[in-house]
Structures are given as C-alpha cells and as structure tokens.
Image (spheres, helix red, strand yellow):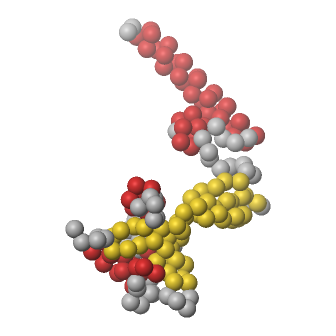
Amino acid sequence: MTKKTVRHIFIFFLIFLPLQYVMVGVTGSMRSEMWPAFVFPGFKNVFDTEEEIRIPKALFYYDDGSDVIELTSAQIFDGIPVSKHRGILRYQFQRYNVDPETRIKYLSDEGRRWLVGQLENSGIENPDLQKLTLNWYHVSYQLTDSELAETGREKFDSVSFKKAAAE
C-alpha cells in the first residue's frame, strides 16, 4: 500500500465518521436511536420510546403457614455481585437444572445449607426449603412522564425446592 492510498483512506474516515455520528444523533433525537442496533445487535430492543416492554423477573416466596414473605434475588443472593444474579437465576432455576415435569429444583446438601443460610440472613428463622417457591413473571413496564412504571405482571413458571435423593 502506498503512502498516497493510506492518506486517502485516512481522509475518507476523517470525513465519514463525524458524518455518521451526526446522522445517528439526528435520527436518535427524532426517533429511537439506531446506533446500538448497528454496533451491538443484541441492543436492537433498546427502550427509549413510549412502547411497553416485558422482561422476565424472578421472585422468591416463603410461606411459613401464617404469612407469605416475598424475597427478591438481591435478598437471596446477598454477598454475590448483582451482575451475577440473572446468570445464577437463569442457569440454576430455569429449564435445564429443574425437573421438567414436576418443576422441582433438587438441591445437594451443600446447596441446601447455602440457601438455608441465605434465608436466615434475610430474617427467616429456621427456614424449611419445602416452604420456598420461586415464581417467574413476565413484568410489563411503560415509560410515562419520564418514569418507568410497572403496568402488569404475568406468572409463567413456578419452581419448588427439595433435598436431592442420596446417591
């Protein structure tokens, strides 16, 4: 490649890139920003319009017989970085690691001790894992007056817990 060719390529990008950013900025101010969809295809659903969005959300419920206590994943996974919560929920409590017919998560002794400890840290005394249920919801949100408000919640799965049978 000659110096002249390199210079032409450099000048082309020197002009093209600022024009590209201007185009994205103008389009983004008039409509939904398209840039994330070009660069990161997974971002094609960036929420910046007044459309409704639905995301899966997991909530734990502990029924002690007289009261049902709602626990968030932040309470159950206390001490684990928040960025890991969704991955743990997805890997441990959806499809592959839950019995597909009974929707029961069988826990090893170590897993059971850990989960019981987390429930105790959440303020539940002498927890029994058979009283714990994980419900998966599709939660709908809508942006109104610069605030994101929950507009609906639809339960689509439920997982219960039991000790794994001795091997």
Given residues 30 and 72, the one toward you in this image is 72
Which quarter of the rendering shows the C terminus?
A: bottom left
At a point 67% along the width and 31% down the height, the residue shown is 23
Name the residue at the left extreme.
Answer: 167
Q: In this rendering, would 3 be left or right of 63?
A: left
- The number of numbered badges drawn on the structure is 0
Q: Quadrant of the N terminus?
A: top left
Give the residue displayed 53% in from the left and 42% down from the top.
42
Residue 144 horizontal side relative to residue 140, left or right: right
Percent across and percent down for residue 86 are 46, 60
Q: Nearer the viewer, residue 108 or 59?
A: 108
Is 158 above or below relative to 94? below
Residue extending farthest to the front is 101
Q: Is residue 103 above or below residue 5?
A: below
Which residue does the image show at 42% across and 79% down from the upper left?
130
Q: Residue 161: which quarter of the image?
A: bottom left
Q: Which residue is rendered at x = 50% and y = 13% of the image?
A: 8
- Regarding residue 40, the answer to whether it shows in the image is yes
Q: Quadrant of residue 138?
A: bottom right
Q: Give coordinates of residue 76: x percent, y percent.
A: 43, 74
* Image position, residue 85 (x, y; %): 44, 63
Q: Is residue 103 above or below residue 96?
A: below
- Picture quadrant where residue 116 is located: bottom left
Asked whether the viewer can see residue 73, the reply is no
